[in-house]
Amino acid sequence: MFDPVAFIRVIAFGIVYAGIEYKYINRHERDWTKTAEGFVEKPVFWQISPYHFYLLLPLFVIASFSSSVTAWAGNTFFLAALEDMVYFVWRGSVVSKNDWTTTLMGSFRVGKMEVPVWWPIDIAAAVALFVLPL
């Protein structure tokens, strides 16, 4: 069941966290540390890095809290897609084939932008979970 208060919190959190991630976490992208060049974290599984698994996922689950379990899960799916989209707004560029987010499940082209396949999947999962009555 959709929880509007939790959903607004998720939107605010996603926007703020994307800015933090852009400005402070992904430093190598802005050439703040030349030593980060070529450094790749070993994935925990699939393409998921320790940063995503041990920090981002728990943080998103906590920020998405709702008394309805399905709304909580829906908020988490929506937050993952929203934060990633807003990250590119903060960055000031569209998603390209070379971005990490397109390596998860691939991407498809819409105009000049690559859209990661997982974005519409996450949003569809969130909508489905929002309409469930639990």
Image (tube, helix red, strand yellow):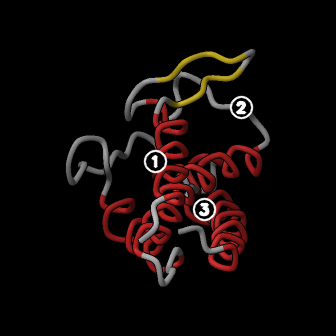
Q: Nearer the viewer, residue 88 or 22?
A: 88
**Is 121 on the left-hand or right-hand side of 104?**
right
Q: Amino acid at mark 3?
A: Glu
In the structure shown, which secondary structural element does the residue marked by tag 3 occupy? Answer: helix
Q: What residue is disc 3 on? A: 21
What percent of the width, then of the height, locates residue 133?
A: 46, 67
Task: Read off the residue under disc 2.
Answer: 94
Disc 1 designates what residue? 125
User: Compared with residue 32, is residue 85 higher up or lower down, i.e. above or below?
Assistant: above
Q: Residues within 10 Å of mark 1 (few under 14, many from 20)?
A: some
* Tag 1 secondary structure: helix
Image x and y of residue 47, in percent: 30, 42
- At a point 53% along the width and 78% down the height, the residue shown is 63
Q: Residue at x 65, y 46 (%)?
A: 85
Q: Amino acid at mark 2?
A: Val
Rendered view: 114 above or below 49: above
Q: Position of residue 114 (x, y in %)?
A: 61, 23
User: Toward the viewer: 58 or 50?
Assistant: 58
Q: Residue at x 53, y 57 (%)?
A: 131
Quarter of the view holding residue 56: bottom left
Going from N to C along the chain, the mark reached first, 2 or 3, is 3
Q: Tag 1 or tag 3, which sits nearer the N-term? A: 3
Front: mark 3 or 1: 1
Front position in the image: 64 or 114: 64
Quadrant housing residue 103:
top left
| Label 2 element class | loop
Cβ atoms at labels 1 and 2 below 8 Å apart: no
- Separation of disc 2 and disc 3 at Cα? 16 Å
